[in-house]
Amino acid sequence: MNQTLLGVIYLIAFSHAAMLAFVLWRRTQASEPGRVLSLVMMVVAYKLFEAGMLYTGLYHAVPHLLDLLPGEVLLIGPLIYFYALQCGGNQTQARLPRWLHFSPAMALWLYQLPGIFRNAEAKVAMWDGVLDSSGTVSLPWMIVGLLFLIKIHLASYLWASWCELKTLRQAAQQLRADATPIFTTQLAMLVMTFLGLEVLWVVLFCAQQFFAVGTLAMVSDIWLLLLSLVLLTLGYIALQHPHFVFTREERVLLQSQKQQSNQSDSNIKYFHSSLSETAANEIAKQIENCLGEHKLYLNDKLTLSDLAAVLELRSHILSQVINQQMHSNFYKLINGYRVQHAIGLIEDKKLSWSLERIALESGFSNRVTFSKAFKEITGGTASDYKKQVREAS
């Protein structure tokens, strides 16, 4: 690909990353995870700006703005991990002091300090050398080892982030009936994609270093372009849920679920519960009556805690009954009522509403969540069902 064109692509991506960083920062409070993700976007935006300046040749005009942030992935890994923690409301759950997670990035920055603040002529000469080294380059073993250590550092944080988000996804199905399960699933998938991208970098880098396949520039460009795509997607998805965080009560239930995660059998999980079978069956009937009469499921922000408050029950008792007696989870239970309500609206001959309106009138926050739930419960799509109803009438 032409270097100038590649530089323009990088600068366009830089503008998107900078915009996301700015909007996420403005739309969230200091205690919300969006602020942490905005820092990730800032780091990525700077890296894209640096690459854009290099390939367009504009680095000659602004040499002092480049090479200020060596080892940026040493920042990205911990930041994504803290984002995952804050999504679960666990702002203080990291095992080490927060500053210690960034100590490798600080150490590398201090080590590179003489080069960071070198004069403009030296910086321009250095970047000229980078552009001229377009052929196969074999790095010293010390540098290769350092690069692998940096990648292992990033991979460990991505794995920890994925584990945290996986737990949040499971908890969301037990505690919420909105788009949270889909949102947490998307986050977990993107983090796992990021982890796969690191594996790809290792493969390409080893091929270049040990088998002379490609160039270092090619490895760097492929990695940076794919990294930008993954993190920009992450930012856009997070922007749809800027205030997403689990509440204090949900955190208590979340911690309980973590402790029980190795007990897949619900009978084992609730073995020590003092709730009798008769009482559990009675509560299950109360749940069905409450949802049927008061139609609480029409509230698109309904949570397990909200339903527990209406029934005057403890949230963990309500969760136990839904899981053990009703053989479901909160997400599936509420969406089951919503889908049945939507079916009634579709079959109502007096109405000619669009599926978007039917979704909103049935308690779904958006069409995507509605379509997914409808297909899971009925086995078919809402549009096909609506077409069948129209043909039958």
Image: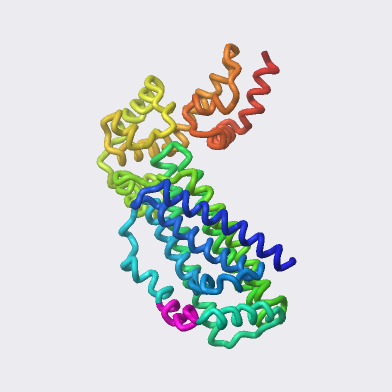
x then y, percent, for residue 372: 57, 37
Residue 112 among those drawn in magenta: yes
Left or right of 274? Residue 7 is right
User: Is there any visible trace of residue 271 in the rendered image?
Assistant: no
Q: Give the range drawn in magenta.
A: 107-118
x then y, percent, for residue 234: 53, 53
User: Is there any visible trace of residue 223 in the rendered image?
Assistant: yes
Q: In this view, does 262 lie above or below 62?
A: above
Query: Which residue is painted at 34% across and 63% down in the image?
Result: 94
* Quadrant of res 388: top right
Q: Is residue 207 above or below residue 335?
A: below
Query: Which residue is painted at 52% across and 52% down in the image?
Result: 19
Residue 129 among those drawn in magenta: no
- Assign the magenta stretch its main secondary structure: helix
x then y, percent, for residue 289: 37, 23
x then y, percent, for residue 393: 67, 13
Q: Nearer the viewer, residue 356 or 166?
A: 356
Query: Which residue is painted at 33% across and 52% down in the image?
Result: 255
**Colouring style:** rainbow
Please state, as top left, top right, bottom left or bottom right, where the N terminus lies in the image: bottom right
All told, the count of numbered labels is 0
Q: Which residue lies furthest to the top in this view?
A: 350
* Quadrant of res 96: bottom left
